[in-house]
Amino acid sequence: MRETEYAIERISELMYMGHMEMATAVFSALADPIRLRAAALIAKHGELCVCELVAALDLPQPKVSRHLAVMRDAGLLRDRRDAQWVLYALAPTAPRWAVMAVEAAIAALEGETLHVRDTKRLARADRPQRLRCRNVA
């Protein structure tokens, strides 16, 4: 119940955020290389759990979670809990201009060595958890 209340509160905050504040939050979130790498993976592969992103980015879980929270708070991602997994996807409520900014930033990563490595590590991520995480209603 607390997660639902948080989501409603966060959506309300984003609705009342001014255009300048939201643009600043979105572009600040995308300005970090780790966040950009995570956003690229989520955009390309759909909903991913933190465990998959930890494996793909080859970074500690607290660091990945902190970066995902920044993007969630900027309105770029939405999260949900499924048992012990926390899953992240692009926010369906993000304004079209923000989605276009994400798409443009991600297009810049195509062929980038680090992005290719991230994608390969994601493909090798623990499959049972990956299948569990993909069971989305």
Image (tube, rainbow, N blue to C red):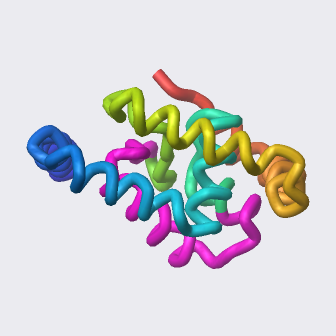
In the displayed structure image, the side of residue 94 where residue 9 appears, left or right: left
Position of the N terminus by quadrant: top left
Q: Is residue 82 above or below residue 137?
A: below
User: What is the x, y in percent for residue 65?
Assistant: 49, 67
User: What is the x, y in percent for residue 125?
Assistant: 80, 53
Q: Which residues are magenta?
A: 54-82
In the displayed structure image, the side of residue 40 where residue 76 appears, left or right: left
Task: State the residue lying farthest toward the front.
Answer: 20
User: What is the x, y in percent for residue 88?
Assistant: 49, 46
Q: Is residue 17 above or below residue 114?
A: above
Q: Is residue 54 above or below residue 18?
A: below
At 17% from the left and 51% from the top, the residue drawn is 6
In the displayed structure image, the side of residue 48 where residue 126 appears, left or right: right
Nearer to me, 117 or 135: 117
Q: Is residue 51 visible?
A: yes
Magenta span has 62?
Answer: yes
Q: Is residue 133 visible?
A: no
At 51% from the left and 33% from the top, the residue drawn is 100
Count of numbered marks: 0
Magenta span has 97?
Answer: no
At 41% from the left and 33% from the top, the residue drawn is 97
At 61% from the left and 33% from the top, the residue drawn is 46
Nearer to me, 4 or 39: 39
User: What is the x, y in percent for residue 92?
Assistant: 39, 28
